[in-house]
Amino acid sequence: MAQAKRDRRGVQVFRAAEAREMHDTLMMRKPELDDAAREALPEFTAAGGTFGMVLFGDPESTDDGGVSLVRTTFAPNFVLPRHSHSVDCLYFVVAGEVHLGSQVLAVGDGFHVTADAPYGYTAGPEGAEVLEFRTVSAFDSRIRETPAGWERILAAVRANRDGWAERDDAHAANRSFV
């Protein structure tokens, strides 16, 4: 994202039009991969299905200072592998729904994950849009998915990737979030 502008009262304004795609920044450091992840990730990442934009924070920061806000969309039935982050994360569902274990979180719902706690979720049948709040601009992540979990995730990828690709093309063309 472009540097947020601070006025003399300490207010910083950020604009969605200036947001940068999260994976094109240094914000989330690359995780170490186990053999199962190393094998599954090429097919998983090639399928698309998720689009994250850094709305606020310093995405080029390599230290743990600042705060950050990321807006992420997930295509219908997208399965986010079990993983953890080195910092606490607060999530707010803006559109669609998120399936977190046996819980279904709808618009206006959210969840908090403490640092290093593993979690994963699945976007609902209409997809999901989530705001991610962190008290840092740079953080580590660790993939913690099991081999059986990767089998389930890759089955979802194979069943949905064509639709995800069409949706991702539309997002890239107009930077739409819904």
Image (cartoon, rainbow, N blue to C red):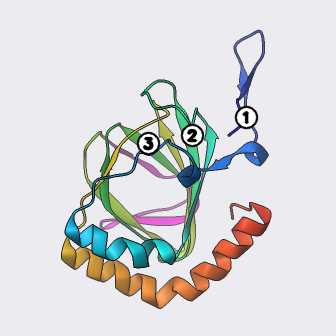
In the image, farthest residue toward the top:
8
> Residue 73 is drawn in which quadrant?
bottom right
Instruction: State the CA–CA distance, disc 2 to disc 3.
Output: 10 Å
Front position in the image: 117 or 30:
30
> Residue 163 is drawn in which quadrant?
bottom right
Q: Label 3's element?
A: strand
Rendered-image quadrant of the C terminus: bottom right
Say what amino acid the circle numbered 1 marks.
Phe
Residue underneath mark 1: 14
Foreground mark, 3 or 1, reads 1
Q: Label 2's element?
A: strand
Question: Which residue is pictured at 50% across the width and 76% down the height?
Answer: 46
Up/down of 58 relative to 105, above or below:
above
Q: Earlier in the sequence, mark 1 or mark 2?
A: 1
Q: Label 1's element?
A: loop
- Label ID, residue 69: 2
Question: Which residue is pictured at 54% across the width and 35% down the height?
Answer: 68
What segment is highlighted magenta in the picture? 93-113
- Label ID, residue 90: 3
In the image, is 140 to the left or to the right of 4? left
Instruction: State the CA–CA distance, disc 3 to disc 1.
Output: 19 Å
Say what amino acid the circle numbered 3 marks.
Leu
